[in-house]
Amino acid sequence: MESKMKPAGTMTVDFKGKKGEFPVYEGTDGPPVVDIRTFAKQTGAFTFDPGFTSTGSCESQITFIDGKKGVLLYRGYPIDQLAEKSTFMEIAYLLLKGELPTKMEFEEFNESITMHTMVHEQLKRFYSGFRRDAHPMAILVGVVGALAAFYHDSTDINDPVQRKIASHRMIAKMPTIAAMAYKYSIGQPFVFPQNNLGYTENFMRMCFAVPAEDYEVNPVLADALDKIFILHMDHEQNASTSTVRLAGSSGANPFACIAAGIASLWGPAHGGANEAALNMLAEIGTVDRIPEYIARAKDKSDPFRLMGFGHRVYKNYDPRATVMRKASHEVLNALGVENDPLLQVAMELEKIALEDPYFIEKKLYPNIDFYSGITLKALGFPTEMFTVLFALARTVGWIAQWTEMLEDPSQKIGRPRQVYTGAGMRDFVNIDKRS
């Protein structure tokens, strides 16, 4: 990857008589960055940044977020335009290749993914090794990591052909692996992929079809799930994406890197947010109890927090939530589930949050996790599957980021520094002389 950062001056640091001068660069958008790669060498000190929230770990041309303005771009395209006008597979091509495909390019890409959706027959034995009540994410981490044991011909990261094959295999097989995890958890037989269906329709069929009868995919539901996948495909250098890049920086095979990303995503502070939002709705229980919980949310001394409202990055309305809100209501109308108590609570809570001055002032708007949680529940997925679906969608972004990292000549193995505050050097004392 050729660097596109533009010089924007220098910054000088004077510390204990040592002066360091560091170049400043600008990207296409966003704040300027100070290149501190020689900071320790020039000043004798190094920077301290827990969580790396003020540190740019890489140069990337894939995704851009402006949290203050509520902007999310994939390769320069606004997320709402892509979600409303395109499809998951078309955007997968965009993230991987950098440009939207021509009709011929898309057909070739789509066929390649379709031809890789089957998994090795022996891989099915992995599932029987898990307890029946195993969390689907535990299964996903294990099975994806095991792919390297089955597909030896696509683990050489220095071969661009093998990288491409591995990328297509993971995008193609993730829905199959995820659907098998779901089927295993509910004790139903696996359903094999069907080549005449689209990516999302195929996944829904593998999840909800049974051998005893045919399954017809509802286009409204499939469209909503496709939008959920699109909205979750990539999100800059979040925890799981950074994990994939860090694992990949050591030269690990692509299947291991994606398995590492899945493990990171499993954390409740990351991929489990929509599940947490749904659990909160269950805790509230009924519409008449909403005022009580609204009052608790406004009380600073009360530890209760409304899940699915506001966002760490977006200080304005989450642009993904705008698309998801519309899709969510379309699903609820199509299924006629307005009598579901949980969904009634969600709709009333949404109404209050969009009208209450407290929420408006604090910019606690419903975010994508709020809407995706209630939508996935309406579609029939249990909460344990929510993060699995997140991982399925994010796999494309992870692969795009992993590929970009490997093609960036400035990248090297990750090795963060630390501030050591333990004991100073001391001599060993034999056990019989210790008091």
Image (cartoon, grey):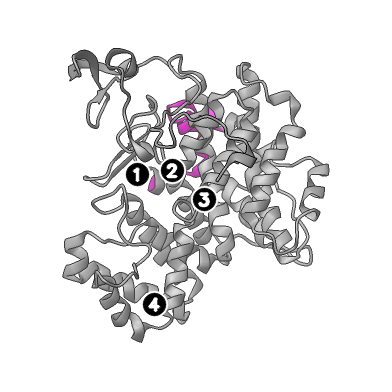
Q: Is residue 297 magenta?
A: no
Q: Earlier in the sequence, mark 4 or mark 3?
A: 4
Q: Residues within 10 Å of mark 2 (few under 14, many from 20)?
A: some
Residue 119: x and y in percent read: 75, 41
Which residue in the protein does label 3 denote? Answer: 390
On the image, which quarter does residue 356 sit in? bottom left
Type of the residue with mark 4: Val
The majority secondary structure of the magenta stretch comes to helix
Q: Earlier in the sequence, mark 3 or mark 1?
A: 1
Type of the residue with mark 3: Phe
Q: Residues within 10 Å of mark 3 (few under 14, many from 20)?
A: many
Tell which tag, 1 or 4, sits nearer the viewer.
4
Closer to us: 157 or 180: 157
Closer to us: 186 or 108: 186
Q: Quadrant of the N terminus?
A: top left
Which residue in the protein does label 4 denote? Answer: 345
Tell me, yes or no, whether the two marked residues, 1 and 2, touch with CB atoms within 8 Å.
yes
Which residue in the protein does label 1 denote? Answer: 81
Which residue in the protein does label 2 denote? Answer: 86
Type of the residue with mark 1: Gln
